[in-house]
Each structure stands twice: as structure tokens, then as C-alpha cells.
Image (cartoon, rainbow, N blue to C red):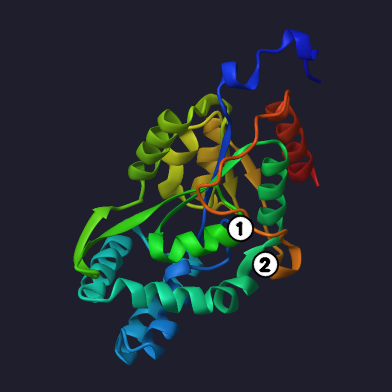
Amino acid sequence: MTAEPQDTPSPHARGRVAAFFDLDKTIIATSSSGVFSKSFYAGGLITRGDVLRSAYAHFLFLVGTADEDQTERMRRHLSELATGWDVSKVQQIVAETVHELIDPYVYAEAVNLIAEHHELGHDVVIVSASGAELVEPIATVLGADHVIATRMAVEDGRYTGDIDFYAYGGNKAAAMRELAEAHGYDLERCYAYSDSVTDAPMLAAVGHGFAVNPDRTLRRMATENGWGILTFVRPVALRSVLRPPTPVLAAAGAVAVGAAAWVAWRLWRRRAR
């Protein structure tokens, strides 16, 4: 299946490999932003009405009916809502509740796939439109090496309401290319996984794109572009399956010889089941 070692360029010569994972409904079977609304309410950051609005937006997201306009309106709403919040308080609330709120929703298939990539020496990158303060603690537990997430502007320790970087649509792909340039990833050898048609640029940015639990539109797009299709169905508690997490931004090992072919074979077997 692979060439003999002496006939294969070294991993450094060929470029490093990364696996880019969308978070919501790809690694976790829910919205990372939505699940924290009750904790923010308990912490005095939002009102009961805000919780109800967040719950409605969360419902639209879960059933897959939130279109781009609705998503943009929710982004503006959350940006306005967070104006003036103390960043350290948000971080504290997330740290205290991340396991309780996220654990029940993590797909076992995603956790196993992350482990497979790490075993092959691939970096794992979580790519999410949710705020970095929410995404980074989850990524740490998952053992991710890097995070691409929305970053709110901060002044004097509080959110200003402006957004420095919105990790959505084509912005995700642009950030992936910047990260690849900084860390020496060969995007043609890299992998990307997402459930959302808005992440088509993300899947197209790498040589191995995979649609996870795709709707009809994304499934058709996957077929047209030659992307793989995966089905994740089994949520599992993070702490019951994960080895001790490696810190976000930790360096991964060298890429194993023949890694891309091996992962592709494993993923083909997964789809064939």
C-alpha cells in the first residue's frame, strides 16, 4: 500500500499534515454557544429572555433550518449581547461547566478519528465559528494542537462588541491557509471534516475533505467534489474515552510514512460499514 521507506521523501520534505475539524454537529452533537446560555444566565451575564432567544436559535441550528441570514442575525445579537462582559468571568464560567455541558454530546466516532490522526503524527485543529473562550477549553480536553475560532475585541478586560475575526464560511479556509503557512502543512495532504454546507470552502481547502452527517445539499456537493461522507451517531462522555489531554498549541510528532494512505483506508472502511 505504501512505498518502501528509502523511496519515500521524508515527512519534513513533503510537508506536515493536519486534520481540521469543525466543532458543532461534527465533534459535538449540539451548538457549543447554545449550551452555555443557562450557565451565563446563572452567572448574571444574560436575562431569561436572552436564554429563550438563544434556545430558539439553538433549536434552528440543531434541526438544520438556520439559513445564512438567520446565522448572521444571531452573530450580531450575540455580539451586542456580550458587549461589556468581563472576559475573565466568561472564562471562569466556561471552565467550571465545560465537562457538564459538553460531555454528553461528543461523538465517539469523532473522538476515535482524532486519536487516529494523532497516532499518525498529524496535528489536530478545531475550527469553529463560536468564540475562542468557548472553543479553546473544549479543544484542550480533546487534545487539539491548534484552534481557529471567532475572536471578540477586548478592551480593559471587557468585550467591546466588535469582532476581530469571525470564523465563518470563507474566513475559516483563509485562516487554515495562514496556519498551514505558519506551521508547514501541505494542504493537499491535509484533512477536513464538517457537517455544514457553509464550510464548503474549508473542505475544498484540503486534499481530503469529508462531509459529516450531511444534509441533501452537502451530500450532493460532496459527491460533486469527491469528498468522503461519514456518519457520526454515538455521543459519549469525554472523560470516559480520552487519554490525558495534550495542551492546545502543543507540537505534534513527525508525520508517519504512508500516513495519508492509511487514514484514507481506515475512513473508507468506516464509510463501507
User: Quick one: label 2 or label 1, which is nearer the N terminus?
Assistant: 1
In percent of width and height, residue 236 lies at 71, 68
Within 10 Å of disc 1 (Cα), the crowding (few <14, some 14-19, many 20+) is many
Within 10 Å of disc 2 (Cα), the crowding (few <14, some 14-19, many 20+) is many
In percent of width and height, residue 187 lies at 50, 28
Q: Residue tagged by mark 1?
A: 142
Residue 25 in view in this figure? no
Query: What kind of residue is marked 2?
Result: Leu
Where 208 sits versus 157, above or below?
above
Residue occupying the point 35% across, 51% down: 167
In percent of width and height, residue 160 lies at 18, 67
- Answer with the quarter of the image where residue 175 lies: top left
Residue 173 numbered mark, or none: none
Q: Considering depth in this image, is 156 or 4 the residue closer to the camera?
A: 156
Q: Give the quarter of the figure containing the N terminus.
A: top right
Q: Which element is circle 2 on?
A: helix
Where 246 sits versus 177, above or below?
below
Residue occupying the point 71% across, 12% down: 8
Is 106 positioned to the left or the right of 38 in the image? right
Q: Are marks 2 and 1 in contact (CB under 8 Å)?
A: yes
In percent of width and height, residue 116 lies at 72, 44
Q: Residue tagged by mark 2?
A: 238
Q: Considering depth in this image, is 247 or 61 the residue closer to the camera?
A: 247
Is 246 positioned to the left or the right of 262 in the image? left
Where 213 sits versus 35, above or below?
above
Query: What kind of residue is marked 1?
Result: Leu
Where 236 sits versus 180, above or below?
below
Residue 165 in view in this figure? yes
Residue occupying the point 66% across, 54% down: 110
Please count the marks in the image: 2
